Image: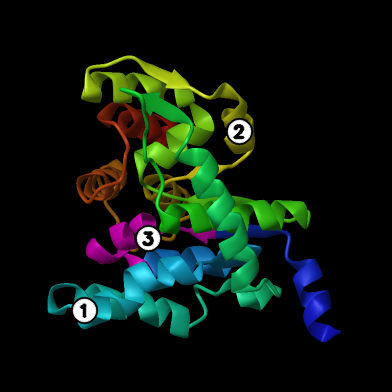
Amino acid sequence: MKKETTNKSIKKIIIFDSGALISFSMNGITDILKKLKGIFPGKFLITSEVKREIIDVPLKIKKFELEALKIRQLLDEKVLEMPSSMGINDSYIDQEDGEILKIANSTFIGKGKEIHILDHGEASCLALSKILSEKGIKNVIAIDERTTRLLAEKPENLKSIFENRMNTKITIKKQNLEFFKDFKIIRSPELAYVAYKRGLVDLKDGNLVLDALLYALKFKGAAISGDEIEEMKRLSKA
C-alpha cells in the first residue's frame, strides 16, 4: 500500500534514452544530472533495454568501461531508476516496444521498401512513455537522436531527410503518424540549459559557460543546430 501511495504522488517523469546519458557522461558533466534530479519533482527513469545499451554491454568493452561505470553510479545512487520503481513490469514494456517498432518501421517507404528508423532502445523509451501517459503521469523523453524526435514533432522533415539521403521519393503511411504525435521530447542541451538557468552549473563565466556546455553536447552527438544554440543563449539573457 505504501508503494502505491508513493507512486501516485509522482507527477512527472523524465525517461532517458542512451544517447542523452552518453552525452552527459562523455562530457564529464553527470553532476548536472544529479543536481537536476535534486530539484525535479519526480523520477528519472531508464528502461532495461537502455541499461543494457549503456551499462551492461559497455562494461564488457574496455574502450567504454569508464563511461558505463559513471552511468551505473547514477543508477546506484538512484539518480536514475528502473520502471519497476513505478510498479511497471519489463514484460509490459516489451509488449508495447514490439508494437511501436512495427508501426515506426513501416511508416516511411522508399524504393518499394519500408525504412527501418527505430531500434529497441528508443522504442522502449516510447513504450514506457505511453504506459506512463495511460496512467495519467506526465512525462518527457530525453533523447538526442534526431530521427525519433522528428518522428514525433516534424515527420515531414524526416521525409525530406530520407528523400535527400536516398535520392528517391518517399511515401508516408500517414495513419501511423497519429500514434507518435503526443510524445514529448527533450534533448540533453535543453536539460543543460535548465541547469544553467537554475544556477546548478559550478563554472562561473557568464554566457561563455552556457556556450561551452551547449556546443560540447552538440559535438558529442546531440542533434541541435548552431542556430538553436544561439537562440538559447539569447533567451538566457532575457
Tag 3, which secondary structure?
helix
Sequence-first disc among 3 and 1: 3
- Work out whether 83 lies above or below 181: below
Which x, y percent locates residue 234? 38, 29
Tag 2, which secondary structure?
loop
Sequence-first disc among 2 and 3: 3
Q: Which residues are magenta?
A: 15-30
**Disc 1: which residue:** 65
Gap between marks 3 and 1 measured at Cα: 15 Å
Q: Which mark is residue 18?
A: 3
Residue 72 placement, left or right of 130: left
Residue 203 appears in the figure: no
Q: Which residue is at 47% across, 34% downward? A: 151
- Work out whether 201 lies above or below 51: above
**Crowding near the residue tagged with mark 2, few <14, some 14–19, many ≥20 C-alpha atoms within 10 Å:** some
Tag 1, which secondary structure?
helix
Q: Which residue is at 43% across, 65% downward? A: 33
Locate the N terminus by quadrant: bottom right
> Which one is in front, 217 or 148?
148
**Disc 2: which residue:** 181
Q: How is the image coloured?
A: rainbow
Q: Which residue is at 71% across, 51% downward? A: 133
Which x, y percent locates residue 136? 78, 54
> Which one is in front, 35 or 14?
14
Residue 103 placement, left or right of 120: right
Gap between marks 2 and 3 measured at Cα: 22 Å
Q: Amino acid at mark 1?
A: Glu
Q: Which residue is at 71% across, 75% downward? A: 87
Q: Amino acid at mark 3?
A: Ser
Residue 214, picture quadrant: top left
